[in-house]
Amino acid sequence: MADGGGSVAHRVAPSLSERTLLETVQRQLRAPARRMAIVLHLSRLTSPAPRPHHRRIARALLQESAQQHDGQVFSLGNGDLVLLCSAASDNAQRATRWHATSVTPGELPAILARLMRVDTPDPRRLVSSWMLRTDAEAILAYGHARVAETAAPPTLNDDGFGDTSDAIALLRQIETEAATDLLHRQTAVLVQGEARSSIRPLFFELTFSVQALAIRAGIDPARPVRDPFLLRHLAEQMDTRLLRALQAEAEAPGPLSQMRRRGGPMLHINLTLGGVERSGLTGLLAQAGTLPLGVEISVMDACADLDRFHRVRAALQEAGALVVLDRISHLALAMTDLSELGADLFKLDWSAAVGVLDLADQAVLRAAVARLGAHRLVLQGADAEAALVWGLDQGIRRFQGRHVDAMLAAKRIMACPHAVGCNLAQCTERAATTGLAGRMACHNPPLLDGMVPLQGERRHAA
C-alpha cells in the first residue's frame, strides 16, 4: 500500500505470540483480580545488542515465576519477553515458593534491571510492570502496538530453543560413537615468573564436543540445541558415556589412561549432580588408586539443589577427588560468597565486560577475588591476551582457554626434536583430541600429554 511519500510499506502479519498475548490480555481484563504483566523490552537494547545470556537467564526467571504463579510467558518477534501472572500478596508468594532461591513476581523487575545493569546505563527503562486492574490502558496499548508493528517474520517452529529433532539426533549419535572420538581436551596452566616466563600444565579438562556430535549427526553446528531441559538430558547422557569410558580403561588401559600417568597433569571431567550419584563414581575413584581426578560441577547446578551438592561434594572429596565449581560469571563472583560451597577450586568465566566496568564495580570484583582467594581461581575462556593481563593483575595465576592452548603449542614446538614438519595449528589440534586417530601423527606423545617439562619448567606443587 502506497503512503503519502510514494514509498511502499510492507506490513508483515503478526506472529502467533503477538496475537495470543493481546487476546490473553483482553480475556484477563474481564476479571483482572490481582493479575499483572511484566515486560522485558530487549528490543530497546540496541547498543550493545542483546547478549545470549540476556534472553536465556531472563526467560528462565520468567518461566519459573509463571509456573509458580499461574502465569504464561510470551516470546515476541521483536525480542521482548512478556510474563502474565498472578500478583499474590508477598506473604502468599513466599508461602508458595518451591525452594529458597525462588523469585516472586514483585521482585522480578528489580532483578531483571540488575541483569542488564552492566550493558545499559539505565536498565530500568528496559522493564515495565503493570497491574491489569489499574494499568489496563498501558498493557492494551503495548499489545496493540506489537500486533500492528512491522516486524521480520519469526523463524518457523523455533521459539529460541532450537529444534527438538536435533536433540534426538544428538542422543543417537552419543550412543553410536566411541566416547574418545567425541571428547575435547583442553589444558589449564599455572603461569609463573614476573614476565610469564614459565607456564606449567596443571590439568586436562575433558568435555564432549557438541560441534563434533552435530557434524557426525548431519546437523548444522550453527543451529545448536538451546532448550535448558534438553541440554540437561544431553549432559546426563554424556556423563554416562564418559564414565563408562573411564571404567573400561580402569580395566584395560587406553588413550585416557595414558593421559593419567603418574606425574602428569590431573584429569578433570564435567558431571551433573545426577550423573555423579547414578554412576557410582566413588567406587571408580577407589579403583583408580592414588591417581587423582577432578570433578567439575556447574555453579548453576550446585545452587539449584544445595543440599544435594553438599552431599555429592562431601562424597567426592572423601573419595579423594578434587571438586571444582564451574561456569562462574564475574557477576556471580561479585554478588555471592562462593566459599560457603566448600569446593577445592573455582573456575571464573572471562568476559570482556570486566574491562569496561566502572571503578566502583571493579573494586567490588577485586575484593571478591581476594575474598575467595586468587590461588583458588582458574580464569577460563582465556581466549585473548586481555584475559591474561586482567587475571595476572588480580593475582590469578591459573588460566585456561584458546590463547593458553596457542602458548602451550608454541612451547612444545620449540622443545620438540620432532617438530620440523609441524605447525602451531596442528600441534594445538592434536593436543585437543583424545582419540588415537587424532593423536597418531604426533611423534612425541609424552610432551603432548604434559609428561615432559617444557623449556625452563620445573616440577613442583601448584
Image (cartoon, rainbow, N blue to C red):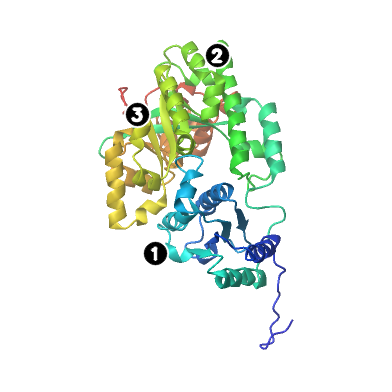
Label 1 or label 2, whichever comes before in sequence order:
1
What residue would you read off at disc 3?
455
The three-letter amino acid code for the residue at tag 1 is Pro
Where residue 94 appears, x then y in whole percent? 46, 46
For this orientation, the residue located farthest to the left is 194
Where residue 400 appears, x then y in whole percent? 42, 37
Q: Is residue 101 above or below residue 179?
A: below
Label 3 or label 1, whichever comes before in sequence order:
1
* SS type, badge 3: loop
Q: Are marks 3 and 1 in contact (CB under 8 Å)?
A: no
151 left or right of 68 in image: right
* SS type, badge 2: loop
Dot 3, how many residues are within 10 Å of its Cα: few (below 14), some (14-19), or many (20+)?
some
Q: Are marks 1 and 2 in contact (CB under 8 Å)?
A: no
Closer-to-camera residue (101/343): 101
> Which residue is located at x 68 percent, y 27 percent?
175
Where residue 116 appears, x then y in whole percent? 44, 57
Closer-to-camera residue (448/335): 335
What residue would you read off at disc 2?
253
